Amino acid sequence: MATEHETTDDGADEESPLPLGVSVAAAAVAAAVVLPVLWLVRTGLSVGYAEALALLTRPTTVQVFVNSAILVALTTTTCVLIGVPLAYLTVRTDIPFRRFWTVVVSLPLVIPSYVGAFAFVSAFGPQGGFQRFLAPLGIERIPEIYGLEGTVLILTLYTYPYVYITARASLKSMDTTLIDAARTLEHDRWEAFRRVTIPQIRPAVAAGALLSALYVLADFGTPSIMRYDVFTRVIFVEFGTFGRDTATLLSLQLVAVTLFILWLEARVRGEERTTAGGRSRATLSLGAWRYPAMGFATLIAGLALAVPVVILLSWLGTATASVNQSLAFQWSYVTNSVVVATAAAAVAVVAGLPVAYLSARYDGFLPTAFERISYVGYAVPGVVLGLALVYFGSQYATPIYQTLYLLVFAYVIRFLPQSVGSLRASFLTVDPELPEAARTLGQTSAGAFRYVTLPLVAPGLFGGAALVFLTTMKELPATLLLRPSGFTTLVTHIWTAYESGYFGQAAIPALVLLFVSGLSMLVILRQEGYDVK
Amino acid sequence: MDESQDFSRRPNRRRFLQAAAAAGIVGVAGCNTPGEGTETSTETDAGSVDGDTPEQIGSGRSPFGDRDISDGVSMQEMPDLEGELTLYSGRGQALVGELVSFIEDLYPDFTIRPLYNSAAELVNQIETEGQNSPADVFYSVNAGALGALEDRGRTQSLPQEVLEFVPASFRASSGAWIGTSGRARSVPYNTDTFAESDIPTDIMSFPDVSAFENELGWAPTYSSFQAFVTAMRILEGEEATRQWLTDMQDLGVSQYADEFQVARAVADGEISAGLTNHYYIQRVLARRGLSAPLRTTFTQNDAGAIFNVAGACVLDTAEDDTLASNFVRHLLSAEAQDYFARTTFEYPLVPEIEPIGRLPAIDELNPPEDLDLSQLSDLEATIDLLRETGVL
């Protein structure tokens, strides 16, 4: 945690030079993220200009590009439209069973989107369970679930929590006295929300939306199951034909698209302000609106959670009939998953601190560059990142190749933006004058950070760690490529069972995954409870 | 359940019934599919279906004790295995994990470190690892991936006595790799809609069959499908293949993510026929019971009937090539060959071991003559063609 100590001696003057220690730490993190991309560039360059151009201008490539863009835009929009109201409801209103809803609407994040997609197809596809249920009523066709609409639906249901969690962390640590002030200035509630709350949470919402957008861009499983042609699919097909070079080239194109999205997000993020730390827990009384509010939360959580859980349970019921011995469930899968996910979460938060801190507190090229760079690993498809690290590991880091160290390293590169985004949003809500004040009262810079800044950013810190933990738990492609031989996690086991058609055997690990991840969510919420109040 | 023997000759029957009484047909099809879900709830214990040999399909019992294996070479007669072996398996753990553990457990001083992933990713991984690859043996789902490694000079020749286990057409002429089990391209069809005689025996004539309109399914991202198109390119030429792909799309062929899905969709009646490897049909039948309205047929002597192999090679980075090639030899043992027949529903390649299920014997199949399986690794031109025609 050496970096944290460094972070405190800067005060908060945006004109002051960058603190050296933090900058070095952030630069090191950025360099680590760039490493796999360098391999991409290297391999991409070897493809040759003519072929590269032909490939990128092919009509089908253009078509999937357009498809991807539409999918990302639609999904991100719906994520914001669902995530922000839910965050507001669970932080700022007197919605009954608030803690319950907080947990429940965060939970879809624990379900891998490809499992969700398959469950939906299983339930709502042609000849699916839902149609059979309706068949006696004479209903022979239900609306087509495949295609763009279905893909947007699934990806929204399983990525809106990114927006929800970052928006929620920001709302929690936001100073509500400002709203009171706005109210005394005779703004109505909506006006106060628009003029005070929205600008305050915008960076966090933008960060969450960015995570959703990048997830959608890099996801292969869902569009594939939902039969919607996107970018990642072309890459997948190339890999399937041993066209490693071409796939790499296309991945570079995907990285370029990511950079564009990052640029876009920076514009949406808007003017950021830092304010005093959270005080006052004024809540909005919903009155009769409680019921529609609960209905909204129930609808979202019901669709996202109940459908896969019911499907998984129905698979469970059929698992006993034909048990495949080599697919018998073992508890070591749970331990393996939890160990690597915990390690990845811890490292990602520590690595994210200097990057987030610099970016929140300082303007200028380097802080911005470090933060932007930290997102790049997130957009490289898992399979490409995995291969890049296979190359790096087997050529330059043989002692850690096919060990858990390299695996955790991959997770950190891939999910760093989740901790950076969350931490950064929290740093922005801490008034820089607070640690200053602590120092005038005789605290060391480290002490000021420890006793003032850290507790205030704790929600973001735990939120970030939680995101990394949960996404690591369900990460698949990089795990398959980088895990040590014989190392099985919950998802690799689910994948093995699902891929070979033994769905019954996928049910137990999937339900355990849901349970463990759900538990972690509870722990985090509890932790937050006494850190910020 | 009683639908299985009802071989309607009228291709339009299904559409008629669907319009008139969709609920009814769904109800009948759903007889052996209690609960909800599509295929998953139908994992009925195939052992409970009464009948003869095929009832063993998919049983959870040990794959090594259920039928007499009188021919072939037993593992007992093979050289002992000793030491550590890193196996990169492009075949799933669910399918071959039991076999791998069995071989490992047979010898006290033998350890296998398996790494399971898709064959293509493992080929890319081996290539990326270069000379630092820890892999000793690569076990592949298809000849294409093995051929790809051979093309890149990453294989070493297997001993002649290992190669001689299978007929020459099921191994690389260079001796770089050997097939361990076989997979035939096939046509699954729904018996509620079609009779076997409704399915043409010539793959090139499929687009001309009006009854196939909007009734066919395929999985173009699947490697075996791509191998099939590659074979068509080689056998019929680029232009004819392009035309065929275009005509098939005009016919309204449905696209699926994998061939297991195609076979399930045919059994569900979502489509009436498709293009899949033969064992996907067997797997669906193993779960739903033989009463499911799904049967296998084959085209004759054309790309639609190619017979590909799963197989293995010893890598140039293998630490102990004798151990590695002796491990490959074990995959050709009578026990392993029988395991493939009963557990993965593939064709054993060692001639003495019989296939299982409602499958014709290997010599009753009519794959195209004079097609070298190694040629099927040439996928690039196939992908280009699939792209140009808009299939991918």
Image (cartoon, rainbow, N blue to C red):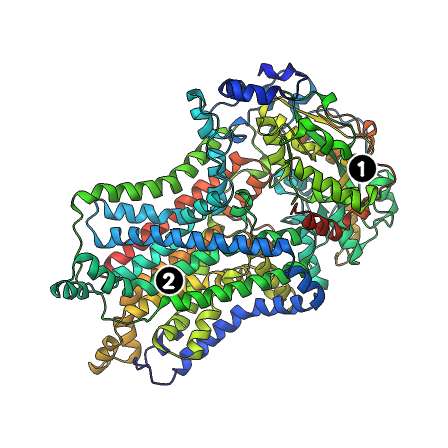
Identify the image quadrant of the C terminus of chain A: bottom left
- Residue B216, horizontal then vertical, whole percent: 65, 32
Q: Under tag 1, what secondary structure?
A: helix
- Residue A247, horizontal then vertical, whole percent: 64, 58
Q: Which residue is mark 2?
A: A206
- Residue A31, horizontal then vertical, whole percent: 52, 73
Q: Residues within 10 Å of mark 1 (few under 14, many from 20)?
A: few
The foreground one among A394 and A381 is A381
Q: How many marks?
A: 2
Q: Residue at x 20, y 60 (%)?
A: A191
Of circles 1 and 2, which is in front?
A: 2
Query: Is residue A58 positioned above or below B263 on the image?
Result: below
The foreground one among A152 and B108 is A152
Q: Is residue B338 left or right of residue A461?
A: right
**Quadrant housing residue B302:** top right
Q: Can residue B80 be spotted in the picture?
A: no
Instruction: Report the disc number at residue B77.
Output: 1
Query: Is residue A401 positioned above or below B48 on the image?
Result: below
Q: What kind of residue is marked 1?
A: Glu
Q: Is residue A59 left or right of residue B38?
A: right
**Quadrant housing residue A188:** bottom left
Mark 2 belongs to chain: A
Q: Under tag 2, what secondary structure?
A: helix
Q: What kind of residue is marked 2?
A: Ala
- Residue A1, horizontal then vertical, whole percent: 39, 71
Query: Is residue A520 positioned above or below B284 on the image?
Result: below
Cα separation between marks 1 and 2: 67 Å
Q: Residue at x 43, y 25 (%)?
A: A133
Q: Residues within 10 Å of mark 2 (few under 14, many from 20)?
A: many
Mark 1 belongs to chain: B
Q: Is residue A71 left or right of residue B118?
A: left
Q: Residue at x 45, y 55 (%)?
A: A73
